[in-house]
Amino acid sequence: MTIGSVPVRFRIVVDDSRCMLCGRCVENCPYDVFKKENDTIHVNSRKCVACHRCIAMCPRDAISIRERPVDYRSHPVWTEEARESIYNQARTGKIILAGMGNAKPYPIIFDSLVLDACQVTNPSIDPLREPMELRTYIGKKPGRLEFRDDGDCQTLVTNLAPNLELATPIMVGHMSYGAISLNAQKSIAMAVRESGTFMGTGEGGLHPSLYPYQDHMIVQVASGRFGVDINYLERGAAIEIKIGQGAKPGIGGHLPGEKVCEDVSSTRMIPLGSDAISPAPHHDIYSIEDLKQLVRSLKEATEWKKPVFVKIAAVHNSAAIAAGIARSSADAVVIDGFRGGTGAAPRVFRDHVGIPIEAAVASVDAKLRSQGIRNEVSIIASGGIRESADVAKVIALGADAVYIGTAALVAMGCRVCGTCYRGLCPWGIATQRPDLVARLDPAVASRNVANLIHAWTLELSELMGAAGINSIESLRGNRDRLRGYLLDESIMRVLDIKPVGA
Amino acid sequence: MTRVTIDAAGMHYTPLNRRIREAIGAGADEIIITGVMGQRFIADGVRGRATIIIHGIPGGDLGMFMSGPTCIVYGNCDHAPGNTMDGGMIIIHGSAGDAVAHSMRGGKVFVRDTIGYRGGIHMKQYQDKCPVLVIGGEFRSYLGEYMAGGLILALGDPGKNSGKERGIGSGIHGGRIVIRGGPLDDRCLGVGAAQRPLSGEGYREIQPLIKEFADVFSLDPDPLLRDRYTEIVPSSSRPFANKYTWE
């Protein structure tokens, strides 16, 4: 007992005057917090992760949860988290595994950016009455167009690269089957089809029940090559090579054997219960030239009919890497910022490695423009997009479209408890346990995700209209419509924006 | 039998592959490609049952994502023939570069002579799909790295590899590497790999493969069949278990 018990993280209180002993909290909690004995609800607060499932299901609002009900001696350096991590590692000697995105209180650049609106001159546009063009094309754009003069008509002779047509610049990023449940993937698939946009499969293969949505799915090829065969590549609307992920740049992924159930094993094409290890690098990529080789191999395999994306984590030299990607025949570069979510990542990576998406997108866009190759690739921004304003701001910083991840999960009920790696998600999202997965009804959850995309799209068109912009293309890279509020000069130089008032 | 001949001299790989696909689509059983000189991605993602005979030196990623055909190469290959290959066969009458059979999930790759580094890296198997890589000559370091399934059979002269190449089976968590001769110097084994003499049952399993390999390359199988073999397997199927504690 050198260290002893650390204080409980959450304290649950059941208000007896409200509780009617219906037992829904007992049924709903997969962490075994509640027990009903002798007409009393007994609570083990230590097991609580604050997923809020009990709160959502309690018909009488009888349950309350308080975070950190026990005070440590306050200290600005030795925070509760710092101390508890040390207790944990002193006991176990292991790497701390965490879920969801970066949990350090770094300042959020989006929150120091403000958008512009028209007053008097250059009147604003009412999107209810006027057409607003949010349609976005992802892929290579020709540097120039050549026509042949056929006398009475002009025929386009330039070969156009395949593009994805999005009805809104909001897509749902790659969350694999295995990391999330099949019902969660189905819900997203139904939503993106309805919304005229796309989703990523993640590196988990494509389950046959998702084939009806394949025209709205971007299939991923990552270092483990799980679930990758020619059938999979041909089904996708586009192919994405995953090099890195914002939540854990520089390291691979690892789906523990416990999560490799019958269905997961069949889509990943690995034996039941075996560990699925995605190594840190691709074994055939050690340079930009090798990346080009992989991009071209995928294009060649699919007869140059599919756009190929390359996803990298936002790191210090993202701009130079993106310039290499733009020359690799890839059609889009996905940049995943350091707030990007994950089912499981070492805490030290999640919280400390990588850079914010705002700075990464701005620098990639600037680099590509300075080299005259911005048209060669689209830029997709992801990692910490929380609302439509973030979408507008990141597009104004140079992105073509965004991937949302966590936001789509929150739309399906996720409370961001960050315990995905336990595989017990009570919302049926980050779990493979059949009884929990059954809690997520794709008919309802898909509606929620589609609603979210629809609402953000409406807000985006209102924001654009207010700024007197009627096409998303006029917002893209339009830094003049952004101002920095209390940002330091060096960051504003990177973002290439002016301060408020200037 | 329908035979199609393609002269690939000076041809880019995309039109070459288009010609291959057209020939297969038109029902060709045998496609003979002459004058191959560094074209990458030959038969990339190609399906069917055709035999593709390649005269010359194919570039990287021969038969990548290929699912069904047989490629017979009269010459050496650049890196990663059989990359993420799904089914079919690649027979190389010569040597091949690095990462041969990378992430291969089905079918067979036979290399008559030597291969480069990281041969058979991350091969994997599922149900009836069990990829096989057979090497007639020497291999370089990190053979079978990250291996998750399948079989690598190295038939080269035992004196030439043992004690020289390091990192064999580094990070292996499934599948088997069978090397002629042995036991190897323990320093040659990668992290997470263990060696043991090949069992009688294991030997019976590789016997038909040895015969097939010898038959394909017109070799005398007897010395190969008479020799002893060492098997390299994962020391644990969970090399990354017990690494983490929950937040």
Image: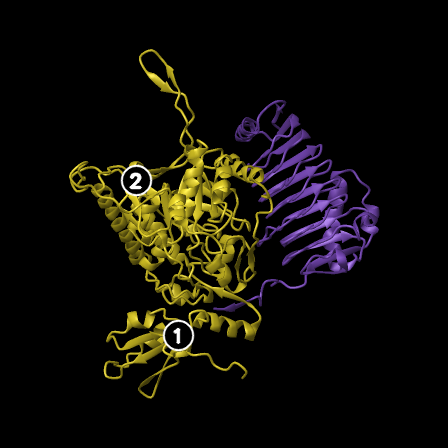
Chain colours: A yellow, B purple
Disc sitting over residue B64 in the figure: none
Question: Relative to A236, does residue A67 appear above or below in the rendering?
Answer: below
Q: Quadrant of the N terminus of chain A?
A: bottom right
On the image, which quarter does residue A8 sit in?
Answer: bottom left
**Residue at numbered disc 1:** A48
- How far across and how far down the image is residue A270, in percent? 55, 55
Q: Nearer the viewer, residue B63 or A8?
A: A8
- How far across and how far down the image is residue B60, in percent? 62, 36
On the image, which quarter does residue B232 sit in?
Answer: bottom right
Judged from the image, the secondary structure of the residue bearing numbered disc 2 is helix
Q: Chain of mark 2?
A: A
Question: Relative to A91, does residue A99 appear above or below in the rendering?
Answer: above
Residue for point 35% across, 46% down: A394
Q: Nearer the viewer, residue A105 or B69?
A: A105
- Circle 1: is it few (<14), some (14-19), or many (20+) Cα within 10 Å? many
Type of the residue with mark 2 = Asp
Q: Quadrant of the C terminus of chain A?
A: top left
User: Number of numbered discs present?
Assistant: 2
Question: With B204 as the anchor, is B81 left or right in this view?
Answer: left
- Circle 2: is it few (<14), some (14-19), or many (20+) Cα within 10 Å? some
Question: With B203 as the anchor, is A94 left or right in this view?
Answer: left
Outermost residue, bottom direction? Answer: A38
Disc sitting over residue A480 in the figure: 2
Q: Chain of mark 1?
A: A
Do marks 1 and 2 both belong to one polypeptide chain? yes
Quote the CA–CA distance across marks 1 and 2.
47 Å
Question: Relative to A381, does residue B43 appear above or below in the rendering?
Answer: above
Question: With A214 as the anchor, is A61 left or right in this view?
Answer: left
Q: Is residue B47 visible?
A: no
Residue for point 54% across, 54% down: A252
